[in-house]
Image (cartoon, helix red, strand yellow):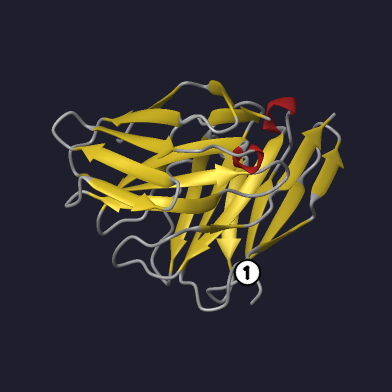
Amino acid sequence: GAGVSQSPSNKVTEKGKDVELRCDPISGHTALYWYRQSLGQGLEFLIYFQGNSAPDKSGLPSDRFSAERTGGSVSTLTIQRTQQEDSAVYLCASSSSGGSVYEQYFGPGTRLTVT
Amino acid sequence: GENVEQHPSTLSVQEGDSAVIKCTYSDSASNYFPWYKQELGKGPQLIIDIRSNVGEKKDQRIAVTLNKTAKHFSLHITETQPEDSAVYFCAATSGGYQKVTFGIGTKLQVIP
């Protein structure tokens, strides 16, 4: 079956522009996560959605970052007024339950380059 | 919050040798410890996990051990093969909430 998909796979943008990154989770997965992976770094948690609950935004690095999840499915991560330090791979993952811990399935990521 | 430290950051082994990656965590409430493998250009993929009521778990050439008292857990890969070359991440999380804290990753290179 289809896994987690992300688009675009690569995005080059100029400093100061806004970007939107999209994630399509596995159908039926109630939990969705965004992570940032900078060159040579680990996975930095950004935000977590679980069903209809309020998202956990504790990992968003600044108010330039925001995310939505519409209809409990597709999610969009928006970065406003991009800065060069925002350059990274942005990974989305989904999992099947919020009551206990289950495997996270990752998408291939969006590589963002801010020039 | 949880803090996960992972080492080494890079590891080179000869094909056929064993590789060991170690992680420590800080939150004694953590009870689920997955390991992910990330190949170049792909997202991480779960390869094995362990829960706090188990001390060791094996799956073919891969094993994970957990010492809850010392708050550390390790990944062991035996009889390494070139296709094992990748970045490996350890992670920790507590039950009932799925915010997962990842280690910084270990780049494993298996030399043919």
Return the x and y of residue A35 as percentages of the image width and height: 55, 45
Q: Is residue A105 above or below residue B30?
A: below
Return the x and y of residue A16 as percentages of the image width and height: 79, 34
Residue A28 shown left or right of residue B74 in the figure:
right
Residue B90 shown left or right of residue B109 in the figure:
left
Q: From this viewpoint, which residue is outermost toward the left?
A: B69
- In front of the other: B70 or B11: B11
Q: Is residue A11 above or below residue A83?
A: below
In the rendered view of the protein, which quadrant contains the N terminus of chain B?
top left
- In front of the other: B75 or B45: B75
Give the structural element (helix, strand or loop) at label 1: loop
**Residue at which label 1 appears:** A74
Task: Tell me the kind of residue under disc 1.
Answer: Val
Q: Residue at x 37, y 28 (%)?
A: B22
- In front of the other: A105 or A30: A105
Q: Residue at x 49, y 42 (%)?
A: A45
| Residue A46 appears in the rendering | yes
Q: Dot 1: few (<14), some (14–19), or many (≥20) neighbours within 10 Å?
A: some
Residue B108 shown left or right of residue B96 in the figure:
right
Q: Residue at x 47, y 21 (%)?
A: B8
Displayed quadrant of residue B73? top left
Displayed quadrant of residue B6? top left
Q: Count numbered badges in the picture.
A: 1
Mark 1 falls within which chain? Answer: A
In the rendered view of the protein, which quadrant contains the C terminus of chain B?
top right
Q: Residue at x 55, y 51 (%)?
A: A34
Return the x and y of residue B84 as percentages of the image width and height: 59, 40
Return the x and y of residue A98 as percentages of the image width and height: 35, 66
| Residue B4 appears in the rendering | no
Displayed quadrant of residue A50? bottom left
